[in-house]
Amino acid sequence: MRREDCGVEQLRLGEDIDAARVRQAWRNVVQALGPNVAPSSRRYLEEITPIGIEGDCVRLHLDNVFGRNWVQQRYQRELQTLLSQQLGFPVVVQLVGGDAAPETPSPPVVAPVAPPVRRAPDFPRPAFNPNFTFESFVVGASNRLAHAAAIAVAQGSNSRYNPLFLYSPPGLGKTHLMHAIGQAFLWRAPNACVVYLSGEEFVRGYVQAMRQQKADEFRERYRAVQLWLVDDVQFIAGKERTQEEFFHIFNMLHASGKQLVLSSDKPPRELLGIEERLRSRFEMGLCADMAPPDLETRVAILLNKAERDGVALPLEVAEFIADKVQSSVRVLEGVLTRVIAQSSLTGEPLTLALAAQALQAYLVNAQPQPVQTPSLERIVRVVCDELGVPREELVSSSRRGEVVQARQIAVFLAREATGESWQRIAQALGRADHTTVLHAYKQAEHRLHQDARLRERVQRLRQRVG
């Protein structure tokens, strides 16, 4: 091999000279790249361990799946260029993880993917948004399951998630994850046939095929597909012939082991106008909901976007915007874009006043005001009104299921919104012992972790009580 020009430091015990050269070259590459990588992301590079070299392939080891994906998307080519310069001859870089032990060099291992299939000419390569990647997606309690499942699907590591069905109200990141899956899948298998379209586009395509009497050809095109991403699948509801065709294509791909990822604004069971046989197939794999993000996650989303835009966003401004916009990530980022644009165009600093002006454009009353804590009485009144439970029953000893649930929610909101003592909350709810409300709070907290619809209802109640 052409390694004469590459100096070597002292060999480690049991290490051959090629491995030592790769180790030294990798250390130099990390030092060269370090200043250009954000501190929050630099750890992925630093955790990589060079395994060795086989022919012209340098193998690097990193267990963290997200980290491998991040490095491959951002620095694969640059790593190959820098390592080639260090070693003195062209090399390719392969990142491996899992059971690929750093101590035991072995022949290159390629992640198992379906055999390359020539992409049908009618399916051009999807125009994914380059900003919609796993790296730019902010993970919180409201979307952790969906994010983890999306990564598993993109890596081809879990066939049980087939189909993966993502659902949430609009603007909470479903499309972001769909684009991230598609891009990561193509990075892993560049020649794969990936199709991304909306339910509405599927309807239009099938109607056009029928008009041209090419329905059979329409279905046949999908045989080459290895990853089928259908966004807003609810648009096929109520269209019987379209659903018939969708059903056959779904079955064809699923039976062939191809990956399907679907998204909707509702879970399968709540999709009106969708045939039962389709609903049952949507539930065959994993259904993952994406609830509105909590305050901490909304702040993280704003800071993440500001960092990507190269803007130093004051924390107090991020917290102010996040407090005012609670339901949609799309609106949240839109407000920040407006704030940054206004600051850039007018030369004004990023202040609370500037953020308030931007929020007014979104019909949000956002003048900075002293925080006003809602009263316990107001919380009880709003909960009773929202859940249809008389106040007399809520404060009574009734053990009816709907009353118990309303009482638990009232306790949870009272504690979260006011920070009052357990004793004061107990008095407001007609309880003699504060331990009963403490137990109710814990029960509500547990149920909120398990029930996405309950989380949405509590989120609405929080907005009402102020």
Image: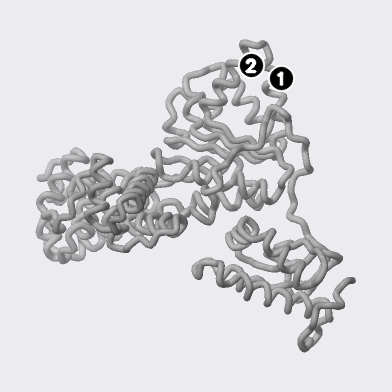
Residue type pointed to by label 2:
Ala
Label located before the other in sequence (2 or 1): 2
The residue indicated by pointer 1 is 217
Percent of width and height locating residue 395? 12, 50
Residue hosting label 2: 209
**Along the line of sight, the residue nearer the viewer: 410 or 56:** 56
Q: Secondary structure at mark 2?
A: helix
Q: Crowding at label 1, few (<14), some or many (≥20) Cα neighbours within 10 Å?
A: few
Query: Residue 27 location, x and y as percent?
Result: 68, 77
Residue 320 in view (yes/no):
yes
Q: Residue at x 69, y 39 (%)?
A: 226
Is residue 328 rendered to the left or right of residue 404?
A: right
Question: Looking at this view, is 451 or 345 the one in front?
Answer: 345
Which residue is rendered at x = 59% and y = 21% of the image? Answer: 205
Amino acid at circle 1: Glu
Q: Position of residue 255 (x, y in %)?
A: 70, 35
Callout 2 touching callout 1 (CB < 8 Å): yes
